Amino acid sequence: MGLTTENGSTAAGKEASGLKFLIYGRTGWIGGLLGGLCTERGIPFVYGDGRLENRAQLEADITAASPTHVFNAAGVTGRPNVDWCETHRVETIRANVVGTLTLADVCRERGLILVNYATGCIFEYDGAHPLDSGVGFKEEDTPNFVGSFYSKTKAMVEELLKNYENVCTLRVRMPISTDLLNPRNFITKITRYEKVVNIPNSMTILDELLPISIEMAKRNLTGIWNFTNPGVVSHNEILEMYRDYIDPKFTWKNFNLEEQAKVIVAPRSNNELDTTKLKGEFPELLPIKESLIKYVFEPNKKTSMA
C-alpha cells in the first residue's frame, strides 16, 4: 500500500521539527484542514492510503511513513447527514468501530499515540445536566444518547478505546470553520435549512481547535477530552450573527423538536460539554461566542452593521 506524500514531508523536515504525522481522512473536511495546517507550519506529514479496517494496510502505511504520531480524521458521518447511517449499519460499524479499533491497536503495537477525532454527540440534556443550567457533561460521564445509530457506534468505540492508553479521544461537536461555503460547516447547514430548532449547544470552532490538537500531539496527551469551545450557543444566536455580519436580509424560521422529528429519521443530540479539562491545559481557549466572532464572522464580514 502506498502513501500520499504532502508538502513538508522531507527527511530534513522531520529532523528539524522532530515530528512526522500520519493522517487518515485525506478526503474528509477535518483531514484536509489538518494537512493544510501541517503544510503552513512546516510539519512533515503523509496521508495514509490504507483502509482503516485492513490491518495489513495500516501496518504497511506506518512502516513506510515512520511517523511520530498518527491522526484519525476518517470515518462515516453519512451523506447528506447521519440519517444515512440508519440504513447503512454494517458500513457504519466497519468504519467507525472496526476501523478505529484496528488503527488504535496497530498504533499501540508500534508504540504510537493516536489522536482520534471523535464526537461529543453521545449525550443529551437530562435531569443532572439541564438545558441552560451551565452544567456540562464531563469526560468521565457515561454517554446517555442512543437516538441515532451513528451516535451508538461512536459511544461503543469510545468506551472500548478507554482501554488503549495510547489514544487521545477528542469529542468534536457541530464543527464550524471560517469557510462558510463548506457544506459540512454547521453554520452553512443551518443557513440552508427551511426551518431550524433553537437549542443551546456546545460546538467546535475548527480554526481555533485544530491547531490545539496538533499541540496536544506534541505534548503526547492521551485520554478523553471534550473538544469544544467553552459555553454554549443556540441556532438563533448563530443566525443572528450571520444576519448582522454576512447578510442583513437573511431570515429563518424555527420549529420545535416534535416538528423536526417529522422530517428526520434519527433524533439529534443536544448537549453542553464541560471544558474545564481542556481550558486547564489551554487557558487561551476562547468562549464559543467570542471564537465565532474572531474566527468566523469577522473574517467573513460583509456588512457595515456589526
Image (tube, grey):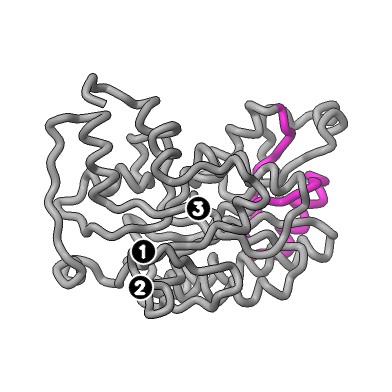
Q: Which residue carries the number 3 mark?
A: 228
How far apart are labels 2 and 3 at the CA level?
Answer: 26 Å
Q: Where does the image place residue 192, in percent across and percent down from the top left?
A: 21, 45
Q: At x 43% / y 46%, what residue is drawn?
A: 288
Three-letter code, disc 1: Val
Q: Give the foreground label among 2 and 3.
A: 3
Three-letter code, disc 3: Thr
Q: Which residue carries the number 2 mark?
A: 86
Mark 2 and mark 3 residues within 8 Å of each other at the beta carbon: no
Magenta stretch: give its range. Answer: 42-71
Q: Is residue 56 visible?
A: yes
Q: Quadrant of residue 16?
A: top right
Q: At x 32% / y 58%, what residue is drawn?
A: 200
Q: Where does the image place residue 242, in percent across and percent down from the top left?
A: 26, 36
How far apart are labels 1 and 3 at the CA level?
Answer: 20 Å
Q: Which residue carries the number 1 mark?
A: 82
Q: Number of labelled discs? A: 3
Q: Earlier in the sequence, mark 1 or mark 3?
A: 1
Q: Where does the image place residue 56, in percent across and percent down from the top left?
A: 74, 62
